[in-house]
């Protein structure tokens, strides 16, 4: 077995099976362009961004185009730059004979058909980091507004009142700020809070302790953060695991009189539970820039006297708009030059070597990463990826990137793809170890094994292709055969009569249908594992009921 330690970006060149040096990942222009490329700017972007585009391309600015007008002219252009107004649909890609890149001046790409872009080999780029500082500063503005009762005092003054004693505030100095998420934005909030002489703690199971400490932040478990923080600011991504992560239980565990700030995603907060915590006096106040439904019609927090609300403006600053325009302009030009682009949202690849053999395993590698990150409970320090069988003779660099993408996508607010996966892993202090073995551990022609290590805790998944479809064939020390799709429930338990029946009964009572099930054990009446494919996910309450069954040691849901 050969070990190769990979931290961050891979070496620039590797020997392909044919013995030729080749770039690991390179974006290639779709067609040769005679003369400077032609770029259509279909939505308004900052003028400095347009100036950058004009340095290397012929630029046409036509905003407010109707869909049929866009279809009529897009065939002449090599690149398209939009914001959120223009919809880049399958019909647009059908009409775009020369299109190589779509640039989105901003973060969201919901207006772009990413699947169709990828199928057509069109790169989609966005200016994801442009709003980082704007959001961090707005978070601090909300913290200060809460601490000093700024909106309430202003409203009182506008009513003709003069009652300064009603608005006694707090100093941020020497208070504890708890950050739920220490990614790009959370880190910038931490740096600003330290300038206010705050103590900053954070919970993020996927950030290394070294990274946190280098930014003056102490990593703590969520329970401790809830108990110690005077102010809690949310900077986590919204996914099935984090939906309504701040609810009745969490508010009950928060320090009495603490404050909550959310500039991340509205779905992270149970708004009805927050209203109850404010009404009961458990929390001192809250500040929200995002809501479960936007506009927030019917939100129970509108007009609450302890709440500061803004209409999703945390990313709206003049500087952020200029940066979004200039960033996307540089990315678009880099794509047109055929350069590596870490800011790509999708990843149409041209990879050296036997891509026909490797390509079917890309989905498997990403699926293993997505499943493993949901099984792991501890902070990630190292991920080991082992390729065994015929795979070991090929350039597996794209597979490693796909596995990292699967690991990181559910737990970071950054968009992860095959191009930037290693860069993001490095920024989070995640060490990646790539191994190759000629013979798989079990009787499979090819096997990909992922293992994550955090302290003494180690979790393992292995997978292969059966009839060209991904299968998970190992979970920790158990060999299984799991179709990795939909909702999967994994329990570790002590092998006792009746365990399977009790779990099935609870799921039936909860109207959750089981499509398939298998169990495995090492020895009779010893440790065992049960895997169920479900038609519906378990509610948090039902999951807790399953975990409370005697002899059930752990319960994990995986959404694939």
Image (tube, rainbow, N blue to C red):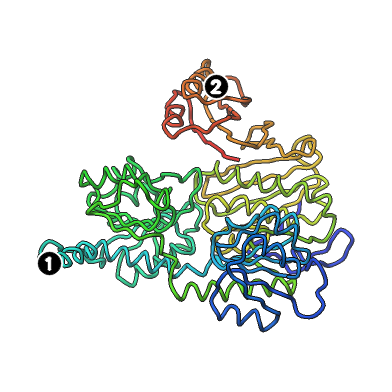
Give x and y (percent) for residue 290: 40, 55
For mark 1, does the 10 Å Cα neighbourhood hold few (<14), some (14 to 19), or many (20 or more) residues?
Answer: few
Total count of labels: 2
For mark 2, does the 10 Å Cα neighbourhood hold few (<14), some (14 to 19), or many (20 or more) residues?
Answer: many
Q: Nearer the viewer, residue 91 or 166?
A: 91
SS at mark 1 in the image: loop
Q: Looking at the image, is mark 2 or mark 1 nearer the viewer? A: 1
Outermost residue toward the right?
A: 18
Q: Nearer the viewer, residue 276 or 26?
A: 276
Label 2 – label 1 distance at C-alpha: 72 Å
Q: Give the mark, 2 or 1, whose residue is nearer the N terminus.
A: 1
Give x and y (percent) for residue 45: 55, 73
- 323 w.r.t. 10: above or below: below
- The quadrant of the picture occupied by the C terminus is top right
Per the rendering, the mark at residue 260 is none
Task: Say whether marks 2 and 1 touch (CB < 8 Å).
Answer: no
Give x and y (percent) for residue 327: 58, 73
Q: Nearer the viewer, residue 86 or 457?
A: 86
Left or right: where does residue 240 sit relative to residue 176? right
SS at mark 2 in the image: loop
Give x and y (percent) for residue 252: 28, 42
Outermost residue toward the top?
A: 497
Per the rendering, the mark at residue 160 is 1
Left or right: where does residue 30 sit relative to residue 431? right
Identify the residue position indicated by label 2 in the image.
495
Q: Residue at x 66, y 56 (%)?
A: 89
């Amino acid at each position: 077995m050969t070990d190769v330690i990979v931290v961050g970006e891979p070496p620039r060149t590797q020997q392909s099976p044919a013995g030729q040096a080749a770039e690991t990942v390179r974006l290639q222009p779709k067609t040769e362009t005679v003369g400077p490329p032609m770029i259509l700017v279909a939505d308004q972007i900052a003028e400095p961004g347009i100036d950058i585009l004009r340095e290397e391309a012929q630029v046409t600015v036509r905003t407010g185009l109707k869909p049929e007008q866009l279809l009529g002219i897009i065939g002449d252009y090599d690149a398209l730059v939009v914001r959120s107004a223009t919809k880049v649909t399958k019909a647009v890609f059908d009409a775009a004979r020369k299109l190589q890149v779509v640039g989105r001046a901003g973060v969201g790409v919901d207006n772009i058909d990413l699947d169709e872009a990828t199928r057509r080999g069109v790169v989609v780029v966005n200016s994801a980091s442009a709003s980082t500082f704007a959001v961090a500063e707005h978070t601090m503005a909300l913290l200060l507004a809460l601490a000093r009762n700024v909106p309430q005092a202003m409203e009182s003054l506008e009513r003709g009142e003069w009652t300064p004693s009603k608005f006694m505030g707090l100093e941020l100095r020497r208070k504890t700020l708890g950050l739920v998420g220490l990614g790009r934005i959370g880190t910038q909030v931490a740096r600003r809070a330290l300038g206010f002489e705050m103590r900053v703690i954070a919970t993020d199971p996927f950030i290394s302790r070294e990274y946190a400490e280098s930014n003056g932040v102490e990593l703590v478990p969520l329970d401790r953060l809830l108990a110690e923080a005077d102010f809690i600011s949310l900077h986590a991504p919204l996914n099935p695991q984090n939906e309504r992560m701040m609810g009745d239980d969490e508010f009950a565990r928060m320090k009495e009189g603490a404050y909550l700030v959310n500039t991340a995603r509205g779905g992270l907060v149970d708004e009805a539970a927050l209203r109850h915590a404010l009404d009961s006096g458990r929390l001192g106040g809250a500040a929200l820039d995002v809501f479960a439904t936007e506009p927030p019609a019917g939100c129970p927090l509108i007009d609450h006297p302890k709440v500061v609300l803004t209409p999703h403006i945390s990313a709206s600053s003049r500087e952020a708009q200029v940066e979004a325009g200039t960033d996307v302009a540089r990315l678009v030009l880099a794509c047109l030059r055929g350069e590596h682009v870490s800011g790509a949202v999708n990843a149409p690849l041209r990879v050296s070597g036997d891509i026909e053999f490797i390509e079917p395993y890309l989905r498997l590698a990403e699926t293993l990463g997505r499943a493993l990150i949901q099984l792991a409970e501890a902070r990630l320090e190292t991920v080991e990826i082992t390729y065994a069988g015929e795979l070991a003779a090929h350039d597996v660099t794209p597979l490693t990137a796909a596995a990292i993408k699967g690991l990181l996508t559910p737990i970071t607010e950054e968009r992860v793809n095959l191009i930037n996966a290693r860069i993001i892993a490095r920024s989070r202090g995640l060490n990646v170890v790539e191994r190759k073995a000629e013979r798989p551990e079990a009787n499979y022609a090819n096997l990909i094994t992922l293992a994550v290590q955090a302290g003494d805790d180690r979790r393992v998944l292995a997978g292969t292709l059966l009839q060209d479809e991904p299968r998970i064939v190992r979970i920790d020390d158990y060999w299984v055969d799991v179709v990795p799709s939909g909702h999967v429930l994994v329990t570790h338990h002590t092998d006792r009569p009746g365990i399977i029946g009790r779990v099935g009964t609870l799921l039936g009572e909860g109207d959750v249908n089981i499509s398939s099930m298998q169990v495995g054990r090492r020895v009779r009446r010893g440790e065992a594992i049960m895997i169920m494919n479900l038609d519906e996910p378990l509610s948090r309450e039902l999951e807790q009921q399953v975990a409370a069954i005697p002899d059930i040691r752990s319960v994990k849901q995986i959404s694939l």
